[in-house]
Every structure is written in C-alpha cells, then in structure tokens.
Image: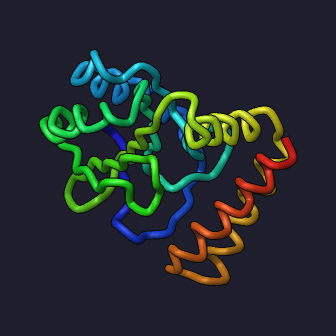
Amino acid sequence: MAMNGIEPGQLELVPHDASWAALAEVELERICAECPERITERAHIGATAVDGLMARPVLDLLIGVDEMMHSGDTIQPLKGIGYRCHGEQGVPGRRFFTLTRDGRHLVHVHLYRVGSPLWEAAIGFRDRLRADAALAAEYDRIRQDVIAGEPGDVAAYERAKRAFEATTLESA
C-alpha cells in the first residue's frame, strides 16, 4: 500500500490524491477475501473518497454485515492480515479496526450493520460531499480552520467534523 498514513493523534490535511480510490478498492478486496461469508457490503468513505477534498492521508473504509452479532466473525480474519480491533471505540453499533505500519495509521475500517443509521449516515455524507462542490469546500474550510486555531486538538477536530456532518445530513 502506497499511503503515507498518519501518526495516531496527528492532524494534517493533504491535497487529494487520485490514487486513493484505487488503493481503497485493493484494500477492500483484500478485506472481503478474508471474510467472504460475513461482509455483505463495502464502500470507500471519508474525505479520501471525495475528489478534490483535502484529507488526512489515511483511508476510511466501510464494511457491512447483515447482523452485528456476526461482526465478531471478522475480528480474527482481519487480525490475520494486520488489522487491530478497537471494539466500538466510542460509537455504539460499530467495530473499528486500524491498519498501521511503522507507527502510522494507513487504514481505518468501520464495520456497521448494512442499512443501520450509522451505515446510512456514512454513505449519505460522502455522497452529499461528492454531489455538492460548495458543501465540500465548506467542509474543507471548517476542518482547516479547526487545525489552524487548535493545532493538535484531535477532539476539537472530531467535534467540528461531527457537527458539520450532522447539520449536513439533517438538511438532506
């Protein structure tokens, strides 16, 4: 994988890289090959999935199962290909995984039940940003402003992102 990644807790936005979509597809194929009987849907989400959008240089991937009771069946196979499972990581109904090399996060995997509100929000937000250049530019500006005003404050960055996402989805 040719991602530079980020150190845990690092806040850095870089210009969009056209290779991210292909890297995401390769990694999704690799993940799904490990759990073909459980993973029913998959998607590239987050800022790296939106052409032209600044992004932290880490892929956000969404994988879906029919029932969360089957999510445990994905843990060992994903560990086998280098992922670490972090449980819900503060988001009930999610399983969160990271792929790290040399202390840098390259991939974040979010596992949800397909069709759940979490699933729909992740896909919906990505699609709104892809469809509306002005909205994407506003998202870029808000994230850059937080980083400039509160360097290194990951919690403030995440709060700003979540607030913008919630407002965007409410207005859909």
Residue at image position (21%, 24%) is 34
Q: Is residue 23 visible?
A: no
Between residues 43 and 102, which one lies in front from this camera angle? Answer: 43
Image spot of residue 2 (x, y percent): 33, 39
101, 117: nearer the viewer: 117
User: Percent position (x, y) of residue 10?
Assistant: 43, 70
Q: How many marks?
A: 0
Eyeballing the image, is 55 above or below 143? above
Q: Locate residue 50, reporting x and y percent.
A: 64, 38
Residue 171 appears in view = yes
- Image quarter in which the C terminus is found: top right
Point out residue 127 in the picture as x, y percentages from the top left corner. Answer: 71, 33
Image point (69%, 42%), residue name: 125
Q: Quadrant of the N terminus?
A: top left
When asked about the image quadrant of residue 122, the answer is top right
Asked if residue 3 lies left or right of residue 42, the reply is left
100 left or right of 128 in image: left
